[in-house]
Image: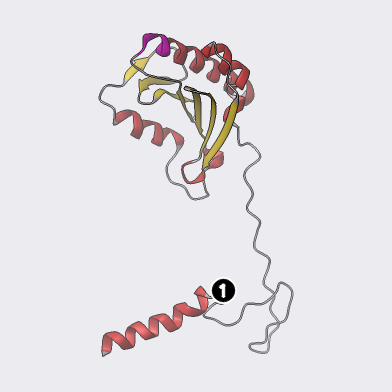
Amino acid sequence: MRVLSVLVAVLFVLAPAACGASPEGPSEEPGSKSSVGTAATTIPPAPQVEPPADVIEPASLISKDEAEGILGKSLDTVETLEQERVGLKQCLYGSGDDLFQIGFTQQAMMPAGQTQTPEDLYRAIVENFEDAVEVEGIGDEAYLATPGLHILYDGYYIVIALGNLSDENNREKLKEAGTLAVANLRAMTR
């Protein structure tokens, strides 16, 4: 019976919050006078949270035309995806069985208070692949590991995928794409 009483008390406290009200009393419109107590109070409007202006689109690292030049094939679809909780934006170019993907993780996309950085994510991913192969001369450091080329450059994490990683021709295309992505990023951020 005591557990039931505690549960009812908890529900009583949480129910107003779940319905949009606070346990302290009814919510007020900004600038209105409070109906509770004798003093007038104002509640400032909640700040609008907008994405930072310095968010970089992955398509600006490698354009569709540049991806076609690297693959040597025409690509007709473009799709973008986002996962804000890890600061990831992806751009996919495709046509039939051909796919060129560029993922870009950046601090500017991460929610406020995020404790992990793009570098932390890069390290966690690369360290989990025992067969990761270091690639010299691209970004601050780079590795070939599933699904493609992982690049760390100036606090940004880039992943490029374009086909079977065991194909030497694909590995060379990944290196070309990685060099281009870093050069384009460097031009935008310097």
User: Residue 54's x, y, as percent?
Assistant: 63, 36
Secondary structure found at label 1: loop
Q: Main secondary structure of the magenta part?
A: helix
5 w.r.t. 185: above or below: below
Q: Is residue 169 magenta?
A: yes
User: Residue 110's x, y, as percent?
Assistant: 51, 43
Q: Nearer the viewer, residue 97 or 69?
A: 97
Residue situated furthest front in the rendering: 96
Q: Nearer the viewer, residue 80 or 111?
A: 80
Question: Residue at label 1?
Answer: 20
User: Residue 2's x, y, as percent?
Assistant: 27, 89
Amino acid, disc 1:
Gly
Q: Nearer the viewer, residue 180 or 172?
A: 172
Range drawn in magenta: 167-171
* Residue depicted at x 50% and y 40%: 87
Tell me if 142 is positioned left or right of 87 in this view: left
128 w.r.t. 37: above or below: above
Assess disc 1: are there few (<14), some (14-19) or many (≥20) residues with their C-alpha within 10 Å of its C-alpha: few
Q: Is residue 96 magenta?
A: no
Q: Which quadrant holds residue 185?
A: top right
* Residue depicted at x 50% and y 73%: 18
User: Residue 64's x, y, as percent?
Assistant: 61, 21
Residue situated furthest right in the rendering: 31
Q: Answer yes or no: is residue 154 visible.
A: no
* Residue depicted at x 60% and y 32%: 57
